[in-house]
Amino acid sequence: MWNILAECSATLKVFWYVLARKLASCAIRCTAMESLRGQASVSYAQSLSGAPETRLTTLDNGLRVASEETGHATCTVGLWIGAGSRYESEKNNGAGFFLEHMAFKGTKKHPQTALEQQVESMGAHLSAYTSREHTAYYMKTLTKDLPKAVELLSEVVQSCSLNEAEIEQQRSVVLRELEEVESNLQEVCLDLLHATAFQGTALGHSVLGPSSSARWEENLTRQDLVDYINSHYKAPRMVLAAAGGVSHDELVGLAKSHFSGVSFEYEGDAVPVLSPCRFTGSEVRMRDDAFPLAHIAIAVEGASAASPDIVPLMVANAIIGSYDLTYGGGKHLSSRLARLAVEDNLCHSFQAFHSSYSDTGLLGIYFVADKNNIDDMMHWSQNAWMNLCTTVTESDVARGRNALKASLVGQLNGTTPICDDIGRHILNYGRRIPIAEWDARIDAVTPKMVRDICCKYIYDKCPAVAAVGPIEQLPDYNRMRSAMYWLRF
């Protein structure tokens, strides 16, 4: 009997011990959940005011160093350069994009295999991109590896090997990429839009260079690439940007060690000056009935990156919104154009866009539609523009403001987009515009401001139109031009 009672007592002790452990574990989890709830309850205004400061230092040679310390265990560091396809001529169009490819083929100190091993041993990610006015080389890595990342970036930009054999090999690689891009009809359509809107100017150049049929790769030489670097990779046009677990003072010290030798002088004072890029109301059509869907873009000249008009135009675009058939939604979508797209099956997708450059921009709507709905979709897209110019309401603007704020905050989720934002802002504005400042400028937008700014840029303006695919139903250009105003206004 005593043995049975002893066993029961021992069993109860174990039971109560396990139960106590589980209760303690639950209490810890509940405390953690409460902590998370407390973090989640931080207001939008508090998150804006708590954003870290972007620090900026300029070296003696004019290179700018900018960073934002967020306390992450990782960081993104990169070099943003004020150079792109807009700085190219007909002869060397595509040079910036080709250099982007060559950057990963080794440096004078590290051949390709050694460079790749260095990056992979750090668990880092090295990447680059080229746009019409900017080029960027950047690396995401652990915070402790920041010095090595800056060293490798300095080699990639200053000591790219440009080996003749590698150049020849990359020609076929770039050609294949060009062919892939030509199968992406959205890219083709927007490239054609730039080509017709800014025809005869440098902004009409494609970032990737002419089409593969032009065989540009046979004409672009090693000397062209060297001349491009010598002409544009100058210290005052460079920004070393970093975000994450970085110390600004450490970054400045690394910049002085690795980038103080970057030249700030031009041969014969031949400082490249961007020529104005005039906008031309026009159209370009590439009809091919073999494609299942038509890709169409219509745009007017927009505001430059530094223009005070850019925020009202961004709110206006947020009011028009975007739509994709795969996202679902129905008659309760906030965008009027999206509701029409759903109810009348007008298109598969659409998006309002604003591509801004140093002195101009493109404000437009891009949509993908069945060949039988092109006319209706174009009509309602232009109708949406006319509503912005004439009848936009306070509720429309309030919705647009909120959508724009959410978009701006959502785009800065992570060290890489923050670093990219820093680099582009320093090049465009000479400083990083804080989210709190964007927020205040968005709040200042009123319905009258939207109507006035949209009238300035949209109303009775000649549009540029690009269309690819089965586009027989696309209206005549004169008809689209006549829809850019209302006689009753």
Image: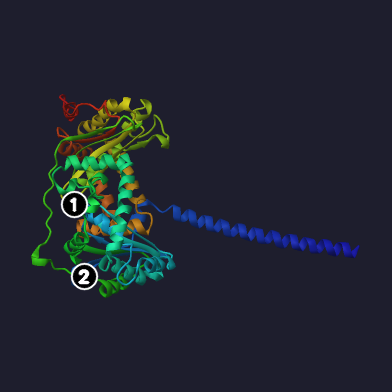
Q: The disc labelled 1 sits on which kind of residue?
A: Arg
In terms of secondary structure, where does tag 1 sit? Answer: helix
Q: Position of residue 90 (x, y in %)?
A: 16, 50
Quick check: 181 left or right of 387? right
Q: Residues within 10 Å of mark 1 (few under 14, many from 20)?
A: many
Q: How far across and down, in percent of the image, does residue 289 sit?
A: 31, 29
Q: Is residue 242 above or below residue 476?
A: below
Look at the image and tell me in which quarter the N terminus lies: bottom right
Q: Sequence order check: which comes first, mark 1 or mark 2?
A: 1
What's the distance in space between the residues labelled 1 and 2, CA to CA? 22 Å
Q: Quadrant where the C terminus lies?
A: top left
Mark carried by residue 86: 1
Q: Nearer the viewer, residue 262 or 37?
A: 262
In the foreground, 445 or 373? 373
Q: Nearer the viewer, residue 327 or 286?
A: 286
Q: Is residue 414 left or right of residue 129?
A: right
Tag 2's secondary structure? loop
The number of callouts visible is: 2
Q: Residues within 10 Å of mark 2 (few under 14, many from 20)?
A: some
Query: On residue 381, which mark appears?
Result: none
Residue at figure coordinates x 24%, y 63% from the top left: 239
Which residue is disc 2 drawn over?
A: 262
Q: Quadrant of residue 97?
A: bottom left
- At 33% from the left edge and 53% from the top edge, which residue is drawn? 173
